[in-house]
Amino acid sequence: MSSISLKLGYKYLRSNKGGMFSFTTILAIIGLMIGISSLIVVTSIMNGFEKELENRILGVIPHSVIYSDEPIKNYENLIKDIKNYPDIIDASPYINIQGLISSEYESKGINIIGIDEAKEENMSIIPQYMVAGELEGLNQSNSIVIGSLLAANISAYIGDEINITTSDIKTSIIGSYPTSVNLKVVGIFELKTELDQFMTLVSHDTAQKLKNISSDETLSIRLKTNNLFNADYISQETIELINNNNLSYSSWKDTHGTLFEAIKFEKLLISLMLFLIVAVASILVLSTVMMTVKSKEREVGILLTLGASSKQIILIFFTQGLIVSLVGIIFGIIFGFLLTYNLTNIIILLETALERNLLEAYFINYFPYHINLFQIFIICIISFALSLISSLIPSIRAVRLNPVQILRHE
C-alpha cells in the first residue's frame, strides 16, 4: 500500500489536463527556487566581501603588535626568539607615529608606519598593490610611500618632497618645537580601502630618527600569525614563552574588530530576512497540499472505507510536499550557482543598461563571491525541514476526515 500511496501522491500533484505539475504546485516550486537561490547568491556575495576586506585590510594592518612602555632594546634578538615559535609566521620591528603631512597645496593628518622594507613582502600585501614606484625605495634616506587617495588630496607624486610633522617635541638651546622633516615620495600604493587616505610608510631607520631612539631600539614588534582570528591567544602565549613581564600586546581586533563584527551581524540579518522568502514558499507548499486534501476528500473517504491506515493516507499527501520540496530546492541550488558564477557578467549588463557604475562607491570594482558549501547545506536542510513541516500539517488533517460524512451525499 505504501507504493500506492507514493503513486497517488504524485498523481495528485499533476495537472488535470495531463501536465507534470498543477499550477499551484508550480507556484510552490518557483517560490522555493527563488528563496534558495537568493540565499545562495546573497550569502556568497557577503562571504566574498568579508574575505576581500580580510585580505585588503587584515593583509596590511598587523595581526598583533607586542609593545612595552619603554622602547624595546636589542629587538633583533627578541625577534629571533619570537620566530622560533610555530604559530608565528614572521616578525619585524614596527613603529606607529601620528603626524601631519604637508605639501605645497594641502595638509592632512596621517599615520606614519616605520617598517623593515626587506621583510614587508612576508608581512603584508602592500608590495602587491604598488601603483607607482617600489617599496624598496625606502632604502633611500628620507623617503616615504603614501596611499593613492592621500597622494591625490595633497597633489603629490613620485619624486615630490613633502613635509612630515609629528607630535614629538624636540628641545634645543633655541627652545622646544615639534619634530619636522622633509621626505621624498618614492612610492604610491592603492588598496582601495580607507587606509589609502591616511596610512604612510617610512623605513624603520627613518622612524627611529623621528622618535629620537637609538638604532638598536624599536617601539613595538609586529607579528604575523598562522591564524589571525586566534591572534590574541598566540600573542599572549608568545609573551609568556618569552617570559618578559614588561611586554604587552594588542591585536587587529582592538582596531578593526568592530568592522568585522558588523559585517557578520549584517550577514546574519540579511540571511534571516531572506529566510522569510523560504517561509512564504513553505506556506505555498502548505496551501498546495491543503487544496489537494480538500479536492480529494471523496477519494480519501473511499480509501478509508477500503481499510487504508492513517499512516498510508498521511503518506499520500506528505509525498506531495516531499516532491515539491526536493524539486524546488534542487532547482534553487542550480539557479543559485548559475547566478553566482555569472554575477560579474550580469552586473556588467546592468551597468551598460543603466549607464552608470554600480560599484563606484566601493573599494573593488566587481562583486566578489565565496561559496561556502556548509552554509548552502544548512540553507537546504532548514528549507527542506520547513517545507516538510508545512506539508505534514494538512496531511494529518486528511486522516481526521470522517468517511461516512464524506460519502453520505455521494
Image: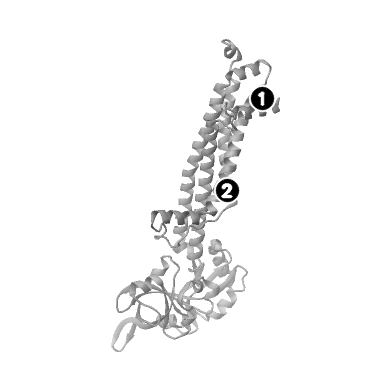
Amino acid at dot 2: Ile
User: In which quadrant of the rendered view does residue 405 lie?
Assistant: top right
How are the colours assigned in the image? Answer: one colour
Question: In percent of the image, x 53 and y 71: which residue is there?
Answer: 223
Question: In percent of the image, x 41 and y 69: which residue is there?
Answer: 196
Above or below, 318 against 57 in this view is above
**Image side of residue 352 versus residue 405, left or right:** left
Residue behind mark 2: 376
Image x and y of residue 304, in percent: 65, 18
User: In which quadrant of the rendered view does residue 299 lie?
Assistant: top right
Q: Residue furthest bottom?
A: 173
Helix, strand or loop for disc 2? helix
Q: Nearer the viewer, residue 214 or 121?
A: 121
Give neighbour class at mark 1: few <14, some 14-19, many 20+ (Cα, 10 Å).
Answer: some
Above or below, 186 against 335 in this view is below
Q: Nearer the viewer, residue 37 or 352?
A: 352
Amino acid at dot 1: Gln
